[in-house]
Every structure is written in C-alpha cells, then in structure tokens.
Amino acid sequence: LVAFAALVASTGVVLVEFLARAMPVRRLAIRGAGLLVLAGLAVAEGVRTRDRNLDYVQPERLWSEVLERRPDDRRARLNRSHALIASGRPEEARGDLEILLAASSADVLAGLNLALLELERGNAASVMPLLDRAVEANPRLPVARSARGDALMMLGRPGAALADYEVAARRQPSNPLVRLAIGNALAELDRLDEAAATFEIAADLAERAGDPALAASAHFNAGNMHFIAERYDLAARSYEAALRRNPEHPEAARWRDEARTFASGEPGEAGASP
C-alpha cells in the first residue's frame, strides 16, 4: 500500500498516492520538525581568517574540523551526521552513526538517527530495538514515537502504530503529517469513518501551515476512504477539494468523475481497480 509517515529531512521524499481502491497514502511523519536530533549547540566560531569563516557555510566542514582535533568528540560526530544528511549525503552520515554505536550501543540519539535512515530503506524489523530504546529513554519524544509508528506500520501492526502516532500528535497537535499517519493506521484497521475525518483534519492543518499540495493529498485520502465505503457523493466532494488545492493533482479529477458516476447510479466502465 503506500509510502510512509516519517521523513528524515525537510527536503526529499515524494508523496506517493494510490488510487481510490488502494489504501491511502502514507507519509513518514517526522518531516518539518527538525528531524534528526542535534546533540548540542554549535561550537563557538573562534575563526581567525576569512577563508575559514567561509567554510562554516557548510556545517559538515565545521564538524569535520572539530573531529580532526578531537576524533572522540561524540557531539561533533553526531552533529556532523545531521549536517551530512541535510546536505544529501546519508551514507557518510551512516558511517558516523555506526562509529558512535560501536563506541556505545546505548547511545540513544545515534541509534534513533540511524533508525530513521534505515526506515527510508524499509528496514523496519532491524531497527525496532533502536526505536524501542529511544521511546524508553523519552516516551514523549515525537520523533521517536512517529518513527516507531512507521516501523510498526511497515511490519503490519497498525494498532500498535496508532498508539505511537497518537502520542506524537498530542505533542505536536499542529503537525499535519502525524495526522496523515494516524489516518493511514485507522484505514488499515478498517475504521474508515475515523480515517476520513482524520485526513480532513490533516488537510486543515496543512492549509494553515501553507502547504496546499499536502492539503490536496489529505483531501484525496479522505476521498479514498469515502469511495471505499461507497459514500460516493462525499468522495466526489473530497476529490474536488483536492483539486481546488492542487489543480495539477494527477488522480483527483479521474476519481472525482468516477465517484460522480457511481453516485448517479450509472457506473458503466467506472471503478476498475487501478
């Protein structure tokens, strides 16, 4: 069924949408809230030349300089891993995180960040111990709860995932991605009415956050729930709402027309499984 709910960076993962007879979109729920956890504040500059000051435009170079002088500095290595991910170099970041875990398997932040990278590869089962440890260390940390929810969804455990997502939502009530994740879990549990309502909440939050494309996707998911439940009038309205937010939406117009045809009682060729 679809992509997932947590993200590892504020740029990157494309929202994948399935059609009305497929299950709704999943998004990795961690996007937009400072995903990977920095271990501490940036070190004082102490820069004496203009050339070195220019290096600090690239944070990974700053942290690399620190590590050249202090290779065992945990904070610098963790922060460099974050900078590497932000600059699109996840494999190098993975190397830093593995070094930290080799030094201390109880390093919760390094384990959480590595788990986020592995979730992007779909390696849910292998990172569950890391995610469990992160949740145990801070049960109310939204990024840990959202990430574990994503892993549980990948493992086919939507009920357990829902519990984690709900904790994250209480900590981040204005985060539309967490609501999308909750909607997906409810859909997997065949709680279609609740899923549709949750997707509409996600759409409203995305609108308030200035993200019309995400709002369109949330409306589209709500339409999918109504369509599956054979509430074709409501499905058509949700698909139309998606189109108002994103006129270029690749599937909303098609499924709006399908829903209208079913609502009129003349399905004809409509409704074939995608």
Image (tube, helix red, strand yellow):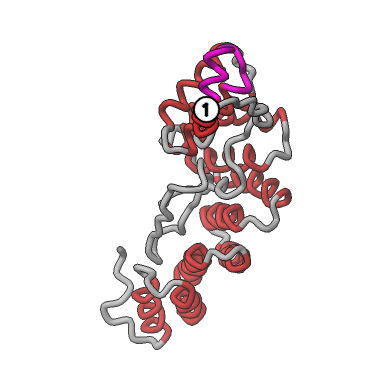
What type is the residue that disc 1 sits on?
Arg
Q: Report whether 173 appears left or right of 251.
A: right
* Residue 68 shown in magenta: yes
Residue at point 51%, 37% (across, down): 57
Residue at point 54%, 64% (across, down): 211
* Residue 257 shown in magenta: no
Within 10 Å of disc 1 (Cα), the crowding (few <14, some 14-19, many 20+) is some
Q: Report whether 108 appears left or right of 28.
A: right
Q: Is residue 247 visible?
A: yes
Start-end of magenta stretch: 63-76
Residue at point 68%, 51% (across, down): 169
Q: Quadrant of residue 133?
A: top right
Circle 1 residue: 52
Foreground pick, 243 / 188: 243
Q: Quadrant of the C terminus?
A: bottom left
What secondary structure prevails in the magenta region? helix
Q: Quadrant of residue 100?
A: top right
All told, the count of numbered labels is 1
Foreground pick, 111 / 34: 34
Q: Is residue 127 visible?
A: no
Foreground pick, 248 / 46: 46
Residue at point 39%, 72% (across, down): 252
